[in-house]
Image (tube, helix red, strand yellow):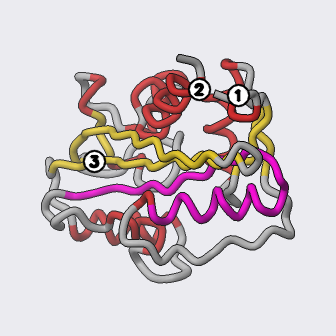
Amino acid sequence: MTQDSRASTLILGTRNPHKVREMARLLEPAGIVVLSIPAEVEFPPEVGSTFSENALPKAQAAAAATGQPSIADDSGIESAALGGAPGVRSARYAGPRATDQENLELFIREVPVGDGLRYVCALAYVDPKAGIERIFCGYCEGRMAPGPRGSGGFGYDPVFIPQATGDTRTMAELSDEEKDSLSHRGDAARNFLSWRSP
């Protein structure tokens, strides 16, 4: 593996401040500094049918604009009752410009309590100098809560009860450390770190 692929600084291809904070928590203990994408960089539209197809172009755009190793993720929630929806449309579930709250309210109306849920994350890594492109996937299994609880997290966290805790707390009721240890984004980040430092 080249030195470039072990870069200690990564550009994060996202405009989502929640993702910036979460990815920094996950990677900085490994000695990786996470920098936000410059404001002038334009991202390609998310038109892929899979999380990987949406994540990779964002990382490619960040790497092309900065010339530095870059990462980007696409993530979302899948409901068994909805046949895997909203999936890649999680951020636009209630419409193209829907807020997190609007998406969550529609999800609550359409998904039955106790339904099997899964968070999915595809984390793309692009090193333009070394010519490396990789995708790392992460998952978190859970179930639908009776109603939203908790003030932490974002997105669908208030109704997602992760299976791994063994209790009834939602993702939004967990501490940052607990969430990072079992979340889909944490899983993908650990897979990336394992590859980076074999």
Which of marks 3 and 1 precedes in the sequence? 1
- Disc 1 vs disc 2: Cβ atoms closer than 8 Å? yes
Amino acid identity at mark 1: Arg
Residue 72 located within the stretch drawn in magenta: yes
- Tell me which residue sits at (60%, 29%) in the image: 26
Task: Pick whichever, 134 or 170, lies toward us.
Answer: 134
Residue assigned mark 2 = 196
Residue 149 located within the stretch drawn in magenta: no
Q: Position of residue 81 (x, y in %)?
A: 13, 62
- In the picture, the disc for residue 6 is 1
- In the picture, the disc for residue 118 is 3
- Tell me which residue sits at (27%, 47%) in the image: 118
Task: Pick whichever, 154 or 197, lies toward us.
Answer: 197
Relative to 39, say whether 161 is above or below.
above
Q: Is residue 26 left or right of residue 41?
A: left
Badge 3 element:
strand
Relative to 6, say whether 41 is above or below.
below
Magenta span of residues: 53-79
- Tell me which residue sits at (37%, 49%) in the image: 120
